[in-house]
Image (cartoon, coloured by chain):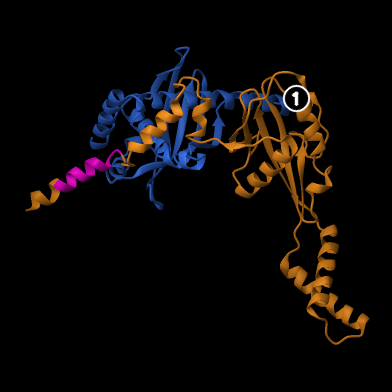
């Protein structure tokens, strides 16, 4: 579920905080409009269309300051429409199509290239008729802190979003984890990263109970003997 | 050293952090104070998944209202398993959150906040974002507290002794 209802599950990223002023914000609104769903033909294929939409209305593809920016965050959604022709359907219809073509061309057989050409033409025709599977993933961006959440954990969706985000906003998204978050913590030493890495160089990954279990194991056979 | 190596090398931190939280819960040390001295309480609830680091597929799942008190949890820890996933509850002032966390990267999932949100959609989004932001700040605070202990050899040694005593109880 996303920002509007239900439990919140998301992929968490870090990125450069947004500088103060109207210009960076205006640039974001422009980038969202330029990469809104359905607007940029370079983003689309016959099977898939992607782009940004309004967080409360996946059919709204126009952005302005008020729609996007809130007090300390901005919110929008990433929409993916996917069309797919079921392989069984394509197989049956292709068989019929090949028969028709053989009759029309007055041929007993079609070569591989001809079959492929007919198959592709049929697939494109069917894709135009097919209804898309619409998926919408909310995006929450704490622009002053430089943290962004995409409300999905699907790796494939995350990668496609990252690509579009990089293309649209020219910003890299870095996954937030136990190490990358260190630079964003308030109450830690400045050299926290090197301190933690120094710790890891000497640390063997022994669970808290493992040393105890080993000691008991050493005692165990002794007792039996 | 590239970033991927740094992340891999510090992967143990998430596991230690969850073990530390479990022990604090059980030892009655789950209550912390935030920077404004408001009460802050954290505990593990309902479900824990424990695994050996190198064999994540072989996991022990403990389902209980208070898994930190479970004999099975301590047995798994004594056998060298780590807490890989935990269901966590946090209370701060009048707000209560429940969510799952995974040790390898400390990512949160399924965040729920027990509070009334505004009826209109836009108002609800603003409320939910504010609650999520509060939770993330608290979660960072827990992690900061853990790191402060972890980087202080004497303090960490005392904490490890407490954790080991808890596991042996």
Q: Magenta region, mostly helix, strand or loop?
A: helix
Disc 1: host chain = A
Pick the quarter of the image with the N terminus of chain A. Answer: top right
Q: Relative to the observer, which residue lies in front, B53 or B24?
A: B53
**Residue nearest the observer in this picture, A24 or B137:** A24
In the image: residue A33, left or right of residue A186: right
Taking the magenta stretch, the answer to whether it contains residue A75 is no
Query: Which element carries disc 1, helix, strand or loop?
Result: helix
In the rendered image, which residue does mark 1 sit on? A25
Residue at the spot x=74%, y=18% of the render?
Answer: A21
Residue A211: give x, y in percent of width and height.
24, 41
Q: Residue at x 9, y 52 (%)?
A: A224
Task: Say few, some or many: other residues with alpha carbon within 10 Å of mark 1 (under 14 / 14 to 19 / 20 or more).
Answer: some
Stretch of the chain drawn in magenta: A208-218
> Chain A colour?
orange
Relative placement, left or right, of A44 versus B51 is right
Residue depicted at 84% across the width and 72% down the height: A118
* Camera sees residue B66: no
Residue A71: image location, x then y, percent: 69, 19
Above or below, B7 relative to A45: above
Above or below A178: residue B49: below
What hue represents chain B?
A: blue
Residue B54, horizontal then vertical, whole percent: 38, 50
Q: Give the residue at the far top of this rendering.
A: B36
> What count of labels does the image hold?
1
């Amino acid at each position: 579920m996303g920002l509007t209802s239900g439990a919140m599950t998301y992929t968490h990223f870090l990125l450069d905080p947004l500088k103060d002023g109207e210009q960076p914000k205006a640039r974001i609104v422009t980038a969202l409009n330029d990469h809104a769903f359905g607007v940029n033909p370079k983003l689309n294929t016959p099977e898939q269309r992607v782009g940004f939409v309004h967080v409360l209305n996946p059919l709204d593809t126009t952005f302005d300051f008020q729609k996007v920016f809130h007090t300390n965050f901005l919110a929008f959604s990433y929409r993916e429409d996917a069309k797919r022709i079921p392989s069984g359907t394509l197989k049956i219809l292709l068989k019929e199509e090949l028969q028709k073509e053989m009759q029309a061309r007055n041929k007993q057989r079609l070569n591989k290239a001809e079959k492929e050409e007919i198959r592709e033409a049929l697939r494109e025709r069917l894709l135009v008729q097919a209804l898309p599977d619409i998926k919408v993933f909310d995006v929450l961006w704490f622009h002053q802190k430089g943290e962004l959440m995409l409300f999905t954990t699907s790796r494939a969706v995350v990668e496609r979003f990252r690509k579009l985000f990089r293309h649209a906003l020219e910003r890299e998204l870095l996954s937030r984890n136990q190490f990358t978050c260190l630079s964003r913590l308030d109450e830690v030493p400045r050299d926290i990263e090197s301190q933690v890495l120094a710790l890891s160089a000497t640390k063997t990954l022994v669970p808290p109970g493992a040393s105890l279990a080993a000691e008991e194991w050493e005692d165990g056979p002794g007792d039996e003997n | 050293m590239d970033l991927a190596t740094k992340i891999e090398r510090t992967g143990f931190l998430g596991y230690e952090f969850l073990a530390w939280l479990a022990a604090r819960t059980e030892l009655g040390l789950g209550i912390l104070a935030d920077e404004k001295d408001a009460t802050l309480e954290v505990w593990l609830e309902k479900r824990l998944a424990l695994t050996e680091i190198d064999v994540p597929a072989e996991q022990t799942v403990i389902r209980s209202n208070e898994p930190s008190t479970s004999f099975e949890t301590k047995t798994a820890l004594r056998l060298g398993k780590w807490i890989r996933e935990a269901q966590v509850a946090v209370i701060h002032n009048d707000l209560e959150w429940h969510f799952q966390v995974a040790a390898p990267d400390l990512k949160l999932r399924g965040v729920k906040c027990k509070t009334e949100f505004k009826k209109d959609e836009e108002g609800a989004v603003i409320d939910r974002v504010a609650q999520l932001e509060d939770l993330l700040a608290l979660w960072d605070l827990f992690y900061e507290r853990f790191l402060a202990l972890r980087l202080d050899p004497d303090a960490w040694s005392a904490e490890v002794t407490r954790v080991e005593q808890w596991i042996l109880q």
